[in-house]
């Protein structure tokens, strides 16, 4: 007897010997349709590598990683990332590109920040009113965080200022709180102890708060968002296959003990964004560890208590080892659309390169 015939016979028996409402319930799983709460309307490559050989003499921008994106005060969209022949090379610098049409097209990339003879990496953007901040990390000789400021939407920048946060680095975008205060997530090098830098004077001075980690001491590359309730949520990278969460109810100065979110994740950066409508969005690699593909997006409308089913944002372009689709960042456009940015990286014998990709998204109501 075929499987379909056997199933039909079983259903007939249920109709005969069970109440009709049980039969109706049995049909529900087959009839339910889960509509994605987000639709992807177009994709772009912001920057593409020119080499696959890290040792090529003219290779200066083969390896591109760690992007960040933000809407500037003048309405343009700015993307930044770090670029080098290979990660950590002395020539590693921070690149920038701009879009004047809300991410539909992108201009040519150019160098934004380059300390000669030492690597610059992990750029982070924060836009507050008419001010744009660029945070990044470098060695001099110890690892520290630097900031540059622009009063004209990235046309000109102040000189780099060291923030005296030794052995710490940033990763995810900073935010301006409903109070006007500024928060920038940071962590202790080595996927340890996430926290924030806070400024209450418009970015003139910064103070560090929080050392949040799971019981194994892992709490790297934190990402933060302020909820409509005023609580600030932080998600943390760990090595145990989970995203962990901490919450601050005093604008980032104290943080709850880290707890599991129930969202599986590899050991890689995620990104958290609260939209103007109050929707909370997370982008992350679901794992298992150590895989950094695919890249998923989930939506919460109850401040992270529950999450939608995962939506595929991006995946490796071909089968094979060495692919990473990772380090996402999101920003919201004036019309309510979203732009996501991430790195598509290949690291296998004889091949080392990374490209910067983006996608425009529409959040369904």
Image: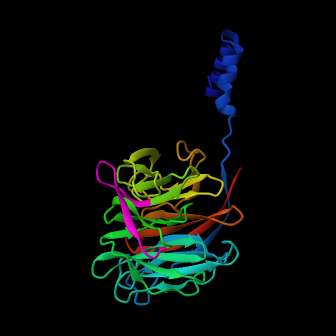
Residue 47 vertical placement versus 37 (above, below)? below
Which residue is situated farthest in the top direction here? 17
Q: Position of residue 45 (x, y in %)?
A: 59, 73
* Quadrant the N terminus occupies: top right
**In the depicted view, which residue is nearer to us: 234 or 53?**
234
Residue 206: say if magenta. Answer: yes
**In the depicted view, which residue is nearer to us: 226 or 8?**
226
**In the depicted view, which residue is nearer to us: 359 or 274?**
274
Residue at 49 percent of width and 54 percent of height: 232
Please tell me in which quadrant of the rendered image residue 110 appears: bottom right
Q: How many marks?
A: 0
**Residue extent of the magenta highlight:** 203-222
Name the side, left or right, on which 76 lies relative to 161. right
Residue 223 vertical placement versus 70 (above, below)? above
**In the depicted view, which residue is nearer to us: 197 or 299?**
197
Residue at 41 percent of width and 55 percent of height: 236
| Colour basis | rainbow
Please tell me in which quadrant of the rendered image residue 338 appears: bottom right
Residue 295: say if magenta. Answer: no
Residue at 61 percent of width and 52 percent of height: 279
Q: Position of residue 155 (x, y in %)?
A: 59, 86
Name the side, left or right, on which 131 lies relative to 215. right
Residue 154 vertical placement versus 335 (above, below)? below
Q: Position of residue 35 (x, y in %)?
A: 68, 45
Q: Position of residue 171 (x, y in %)?
A: 44, 67
Q: Is residue 63 visible?
A: no
Q: Is residue 7 visible?
A: yes
């Amino acid at each position: 007897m075929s499987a379909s015939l056997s199933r039909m016979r079983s259903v007939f028996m249920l109709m005969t010997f069970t109440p009709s409402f049980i039969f109706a319930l049995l049909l529900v799983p087959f009839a339910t349709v889960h509509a994605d709460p987000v639709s992807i309307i177009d994709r772009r490559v912001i920057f593409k590598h020119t080499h696959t050989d890290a040792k090529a003499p003219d290779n200066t921008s083969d390896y591109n990683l760690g992007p960040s994106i933000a809407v500037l005060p003048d309405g343009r969209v700015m993307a930044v990332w770090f670029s080098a022949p290979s990660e950590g090379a002395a020539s590693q610098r921070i690149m920038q590109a701009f879009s004047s049409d809300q991410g539909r097209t992108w201009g040519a990339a150019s160098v934004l920040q380059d300390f000669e003879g030492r690597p610059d990496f992990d750029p982070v953007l924060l836009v507050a009113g008419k001010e744009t901040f660029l945070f990044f990390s470098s060695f001099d000789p110890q690892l520290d965080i630097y900031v540059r400021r622009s009063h004209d939407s990235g046309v000109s920048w102040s000189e780099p200022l060291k923030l005296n946060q030794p052995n710490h680095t940033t990763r995810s975008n900073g935010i301006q709180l409903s109070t006007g205060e500024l928060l920038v997530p940071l962590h202790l090098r080595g996927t340890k102890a996430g926290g924030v830098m806070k400024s209450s004077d418009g970015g003139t001075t910064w103070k560090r708060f929080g050392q949040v980690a799971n019981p194994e001491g892992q709490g790297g590359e934190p990402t933060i968002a302020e909820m409509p309730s005023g609580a600030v949520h932080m998600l943390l990278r760990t090595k145990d296959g989970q995203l962990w969460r901490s919450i601050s109810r005093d604008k980032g100065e104290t943080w709850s003990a880290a707890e599991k979110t129930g969202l599986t994740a590899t050991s890689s950066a995620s990104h958290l964004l609260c939209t103007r409508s109050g929707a909370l969005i997370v982008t992350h690699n679901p794992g298992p560890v150590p895989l950094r593909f695919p890249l998923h997006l989930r939506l919460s409308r109850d401040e992270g208590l529950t999450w939608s089913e995962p939506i595929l944002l991006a995946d490796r372009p071909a089968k094979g080892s060495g692919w990473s689709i990772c380090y996402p960042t999101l920003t919201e456009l004036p019309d309510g659309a979203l732009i996501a940015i991430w790195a598509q990286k290949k690291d296998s014998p004889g091949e080392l390169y990374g490209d910067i990709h983006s996608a425009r998204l529409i959040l369904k109501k």
